[in-house]
Image: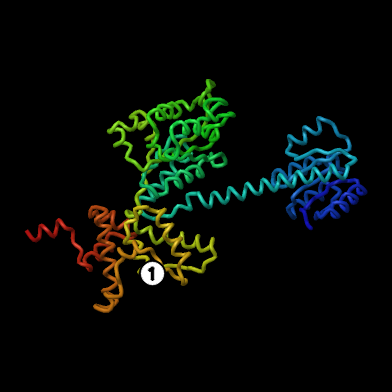
Amino acid sequence: MRKGSLLLVDDDRQVLHSMADWLRQQGYQVDAVSSRAEALAAAGRKSYDLALVDIRLADGDGFEILAHFRQHSPATAVIMVTGYGTVEAAIEAIRAGAFDFLTKPLIDEELEMAIHRAMSQRAVIEENKNLKAQLDLRYGLENIIGQDHRMLRVFDMIQAVADTKATVLITGESGTGKSMIARAIHRASSRRDKPFVEVACGALPETLLESELFGHVAGAFTGAVSEKIGKFMQANEGTIFLDEISTASPGMQVKLLRVLQEFEFEQVGGTKTFSVDTRVILATNEDLAKAVAEGRFRQDLYYRVNVINIELPPLRDRISDIPLLAQHFLQRIARETGKQVHGFRDQALWALQAYHWPGNVRELQNVIERAVLLGKGPMIGIEDLPPNLTLSAPTLAPAVGACGLKQAMATPERQIILEVLEANHWNRQATAEALGINRTTLYKKMKRLGIEEPRRTASLRS
């Protein structure tokens, strides 16, 4: 079984061929060369998992080969070998980027163990690289779907604030994607390779929340048998996301204010002050200004957290994004489940756009998942949607029988335009942007469908 590809470099041909034969017997794919020039040529032709390089070569220095790999193939682990081993040479090799340093004569077990360690570390690095790529795919800005003008402003703000340390407050109804926006900010920042720590403040009572955020010392309270590192410390050099911040108690609000101002805190039951370099993002589905007016949220904390506010619109106010989101969820769920579902029938899309979505994007995702799993055919029809959506859906069949296809299709279009006009208080520019059309097209559609603004109709009658 092939374990990996190795490049052996040694000008002692007897040692070189003996080592190459033994490693091939162990299952490695081995290329053996006896000079610096041959090694650099081999490294230029193909990539290797590991290079085993003698320091002293007839035509140069093994450190030149090490430098070549560090510059052109940093994923290749390099083990330096010499018959004149000294502590200074070992230190120089490790500082230059070598994974390990071995001295001749090489013992089989020692060599195999060094190669195994190098391969294991390479596998971990590759796995971390893949995981980061998956995180970018799942939580990066490109994974947030939306063409509505409100969402385009959100995207611009994410890019603008990502690389600052400014506190960000994300507001919006439940299910609008606040956690995803927080992760997108983190992934777009220079902290992207550091921890992202999420805390649901509303899910914990005050005593446990304080311990969760700041940690505790052993014996701080009943059950605290050992020291605990808090989330703020875990997020050091990274990002901490505090969801449902409006649920924090008055006492916790005081502690949070100090952390956000000074980035210092003490563990529960402890006296040592800790300092952290943490980016703080907060979220709430409540109107914090109203909570301040009612005395439920500290005014000084409100001013501190409301440095940059990103407000996410509810899904009912961006219905032009519904087909995009629905298709995105359909493709992902079909891929994950292996279902052969490709799209939506027109009446199903009309039903999705006519619904008011109290649960926002999260509810839409759940609806699409249900439809994909329970649907019978390759296209999702209105019969595959939950009853609460179909009740609000514009009907097509009766209209077709009564007045023909063209007029029947105008019925849901009129209803959708009316709903968006009302949602935007009859602001035609905003309505056109929400529908993904230009204002002239909207005027033409309103005229064709007989849609007039209520105020104008009333004035004409008077």
- Who's the residue at 38% across and 63% down the image? 386
Q: Residue 130 in the image: x percent, y percent?
A: 61, 50
Q: Quadrant of the N terminus?
A: bottom right
Q: Measured from the top left, where is residue 461 in percent x and y?
A: 8, 61
Type of amino acid under label 1: Glu
Q: Foreground: 56 or 350?
A: 350
Across and down, in percent, residue 404 comes to 27, 78
User: Nearest the camera: 128 or 398?
Assistant: 398
The quarter of the picture where residue 394 lies is bottom left
Relative to 442, 121 lies left or right: right
Q: Residue at x 49, y 40 (%)?
A: 198
Label tally: 1
- Observer-nearest of 446 and 311: 311
In terms of image quadrants, where is residue 412? bottom left
Q: Helix, strand, or loop for circle 1? A: helix
> What scheme was used to colour the molecule?
rainbow
Extreme-front residue of the structure:
222
Question: Residue at (34%, 41%) from the top-left corner?
Answer: 286
Q: Would residue 34 be found to the left or right of residue 276 on screen?
A: right
Circle 1 Cα neighbour tier, 10 Å, few/some/many (<14 / 14–19 / ≥20): few
Quarter of the picture containing the C terminus is: bottom left
Q: Is residue 176 left or right of residue 425?
A: right
Residue 145 left/right relative to 392: right
Residue at 18% over, 61% down: 452
According to the picture, the residue beneath numbered tag 1 turns out to be 383
Q: Residue furthest left?
A: 462
